[in-house]
Amino acid sequence: MTQQLPTTPFGRRSMSLGLLASQVTAQAVTPDLVVHKWKVFQHIREAREAVGATDRALAILSALLSFHQETTMCADGDLVVFPSNAQLSDRANGMSPATLRRHIAILVHCGLVIRRDSPNGKRFARKGPSGEIEQAYGFDLAPIVARADEFKRLAETTQAEKKAFRILRERLTIARRDVVKMIAAGIEEGVPGDWRGYRMAYEGLMERLPRSASKAMVEIILAELSALRALVHKALEDFIKSQNPDANESHNERHKQNSKPDSKNESEYSHSTEKEGGACGSDNVRMLPQRDLPLNIIVDACPEIRGLAAGGEIRTWRDLLATAQLARAYLGISPSAYQDACAAMGEGQAATVIAAILQRTEQISSPGGYLRSLTKRAQEGKFSTWPMVMALLRAKLDQQRDGAGRIRSSPADGPRPAKRP
């Protein structure tokens, strides 16, 4: 039978090459080396993934450092601390003994501390006649001093990698916004091109982008998105070059009229009977609150609208109004239809309706015709945005409760527009 290693309150006493390497490093340090313990701890915390330490292990390390009386640590000083289990648990935010054992083992394995065991496994200090400590048994903090420069380099490398990743995500956000805006411009201006295909390609890329994407995944998506942006930009550029700059004014006027389809191309009135979750009878509408819906409720009920916002965030009503204009073009709704909605409902409610249509775009075959229908109801006093938004909130809660699916929310740089048939 294999002999079991003896155990103590802080786990098994095993020796490994890593632990021996930590001891050798601590012994080889220059005697006059002095470091600021909390600065070194900050470097360790920033580079904790590279070091291999956990958050709780660092909480224990912070507690151990607090038992060292001086702010600075000298290589030739007394670097062994010997707190009791109760003291260490108290300074580590009441951590349980089992958790202490597990994460102290991680500190030892990472080479951040060295165990100095007494013959009986207890932690204590033996003092000489003059009161000075002659021998201490507990946790040796010498690796903190010996590896201070290493921890600083690791922290700097980690910060540089985080900065590079942040810049990469910013580039992805800009590329997303450019593609959405160019697709919307192509649809609105009637530019010949496979805009449905471009939009489907964009949505396919966003489907592949996880909520917490790795750097490698972001690089792949950015490369493909940049290629898509180049294709869309070329389609717009070729159309601009194809136009005859010497054409007469009447030709230009005809092009303007044909490039902004109105109600005829939207099949608006053919969908006026489409069911609408937010419309109700005039008597019920008069019973609803007359004030505008809070902005945070609108954004919570219609999270897809954030995908078209600058920076992926909508913080003010001005942000919502500006984003609604972009969403209108993305949905293929004519400017005149949106202007009529603003006149009948007010800009705030019209922007709210656009956000709701974008959220329900998979169920609405003709966004332009749907908006015309709601505008007509508003003109007759039979429409309010309250039931519409509340219905979306209820659907979101039902999905979360039933576990049938989840409403898509944004990644770090905002959600993607929903698919349209």
Image (spheres, rainbow, N blue to C red):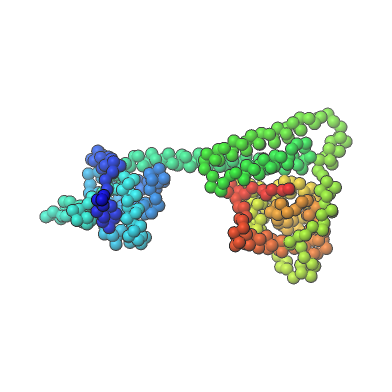
Residue nearest the viewer, comparing 11 with 332: 11
View extreme (left): residue: 129
Residue 55, can we see it?
A: yes
Q: In the image, what residue occupies the spot 62% across and 45% down?
A: 207
Q: In the image, what residue occupies the spot 79% across and 61% down?
A: 378
Q: Is residue 312 left or right of residue 366?
A: left
Where residue 385 appears, x then y in whole percent?
A: 72, 61
Q: How many marks?
A: 0
Compared with 106, 275 (above or below) is: below
Residue nearest the viewer, comparing 164 with 196: 196
Quarter residue 288 falls in: bottom right
Quarter residue 234 falls in: top right
Where residue 420 appears, x then y in whole percent?
A: 72, 48
Q: Is residue 317 left or right of residue 364?
A: left
Where residue 393 appears, x then y in whole percent?
A: 65, 61
Q: In the image, what residue occupies the spot 31% across and 45% down?
A: 111
Q: Is residue 350 left or right of residue 63?
A: right
Compared with 296, 159 (above or below) is: above
Residue 72, can we see it?
A: no
Residue nearest the viewer, comparing 238 with 50: 50
View extreme (front): residue: 1
View extreme (right): residue: 250
Q: In the image, what residue occupies the spot 84% across and 54% down?
A: 269
Where residue 382 appears, x then y in whole percent?
A: 80, 64
